[in-house]
Image (cartoon, rainbow, N blue to C red):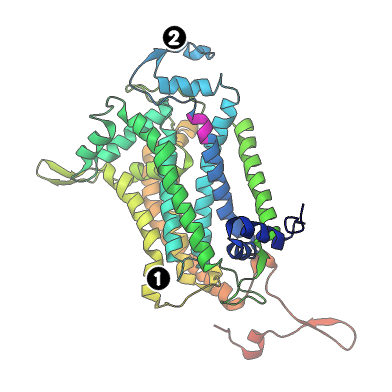
Amino acid sequence: MSDADRTDGRPSDAVRFVDDRLGAGRFAKRMLRYVFPEHWSFLLGEVALYSFVFLLLSGTFLAFFFTPDIHSREVYDGPFRELAGMTVTPAYSSTVALSSTVPGGLLIRQAHHWAADIFIAAMVIHLLRVFFTGAFRRPREAIWLLGVLLLALGVFEGFAGYSLPDDLMSGMGLAIAYGVAMSLPLIGGPFAALAWGGQYPGPGAIESRLFIAHVFIVPLIMAAVIGLHLTLVARHHHTQFPGRGRREDNTVGNPLWPGYALRSLGLMLLVSAVIVALGGLVQINPIWQWGPYEINRATNGAQPDWYLGWLIGGLRLMPNIEIRIGSLTLVPNPFWGGAFFPMVVFGVAATYPFLERRLGGDRARHHLLDRPRDHPWRTAFGAAFLSWVVMVFYAGSADRVFFQFGISYEDQVAVYRWVVIVLPVLVFIAVKKACDELRASGARPGLGGPEIAVVRRPDGGFDAAPTAIERTGSRSP
């Protein structure tokens, strides 16, 4: 082997290898030297990314064994004795077979389900971190919009996958979705008929359409959005918290190679290990217990995956309000909780960066992050808005509370309707006051309070030095 072809693992050798074969040495050198800031919260986005990769791989495996057919019927003759002799759809039968006869099928199916829950949870927490630190400000508004779009796509993708097995739970979810689709003003009827292939439950067309969307269309769109999202992040560079040596025009941290790449690889393996462990040890969505879906069957205490709980809560809390003209109903009641409520949530999330810039008049470029206390109005609004959505989410569990503890369903709904109005106001006031006080005092509760200086007395003892507030008798802004 010649000296030109010999490498010893240094970045320069890797760049030389790439440049010799592809002519991309300059680009590879820049990428290897890309700097990532040091902070644990920046890993939340990577947790979502690696969960998405796991979903693609595990979903590909599951697609080989799943049959998206709910039109025909067959008699179940598998190993679950409770289902023996029941008439089921091929969709339900193939999902049960995945959980019983396909080698490794139950592990992969449950791990896939857990990965979906983790993926959406990581995106939500990541977006909250971006919001409360102001990382959405100019020039990163497009990155924020792509993140909000990715969350919306993730929720729909999760719903589509959750609806495929044709068990009792997924069938009830599709029935609710049909009601929400029908409630869309003006277009509800034609849209629902087009999606379901006719009046509910339709000829079974919805299953194959959801399968195509879940396996092909939505993942492709999400992959494109993620790619564009990461490209814009690299284009504008990562934000970072203020600190020693950190300015608006630099980034302090670890280069991609070797430090950050190896750390990120370790995180990918850890995320995968946790997902597989959950899939093997913690049961989720045991459809053999729910049984196949039939129109005349329902179950008390039924709950969808957590990321759909806020939509169920919206449907349950909305009073019986409909917009009518004579005998014509323009806006049926399910529209408010099932469609208008998520439109408000995602609409506020998408437009907030532009509203804050217009109201605050801040048109500067920002590469340093805020602490939540540094922007009390934003933090208070975000906490209040989040408390509103969270309480609607909890309202979605009202039937579980009734089922487990016997607390009246009607009384719960009445209480939640007041709580979702009063609690956000109280949260806004409390968070705004806390941020103002923390900002003025400089206290750091999570780090043991503000830094203090000490002076040595002549006798060898120590006293705390007077603070700026004590010397001036006032608080600094």
Q: Which residue is mark 2?
A: 85
Q: Quadrant of residue 274?
A: top right
Q: Nearer the viewer, residue 348 or 236?
A: 236
Residue 159 placed where, x, y %?
41, 38
Residue 156 falls inside the magenta stretch: no
Crowd class of label 1 (few under 14; some 14 to 19; many from 20; radius 10 Å):
some
Instruction: Name above or below for residue 72 compared with residue 344.
Output: above
- Work out which residue is located at the far left of the displayed protein and give it: 326
Q: Secondary structure at mark 1?
A: helix
Tag 2: residue type?
Gly
Taking the spot 40% from the left edge, 57% from the top edge, the residue there is: 422
Q: Which residue is mark 1?
A: 356
Taking the spot 57% from the left edge, 26% from the top edge, the residue there is: 106
Mark 2 and mark 1 in contact? Answer it, CB < 8 Å: no
Q: Nearer the viewer, residue 394 or 80?
A: 80
**Residue 340 in the figure: left or right of residue 77:** left
Residue 258 placed where, x, y %?
70, 58
Residue at mark 2 to residue at mark 1: CA–CA distance: 61 Å
Residue 60 falls inside the magenta stretch: yes
**Residue 430 in the figure: left or right of residue 244:** left
Tag 1: residue type?
Glu
Instruction: Name above or below for residue 322 compared with residue 259.
Output: above
Instruction: Name above or below for residue 381 compared with residue 22.
Output: below
Kindly tell me whether residue 412 is visible in this rendering: no
Looking at the rendering, in which quadrant would you find the C terminus? bottom right
Q: Of helix, strand and loop, which mostly describes the magenta segment?
A: helix
**Residue 233 in the figure: left or right of residue 328:** right
Question: Where residue 291 is drawn, which disc sits there?
Answer: none
Residue 357 placed where, x, y %?
40, 73
Q: Which residues are magenta?
A: 59-63
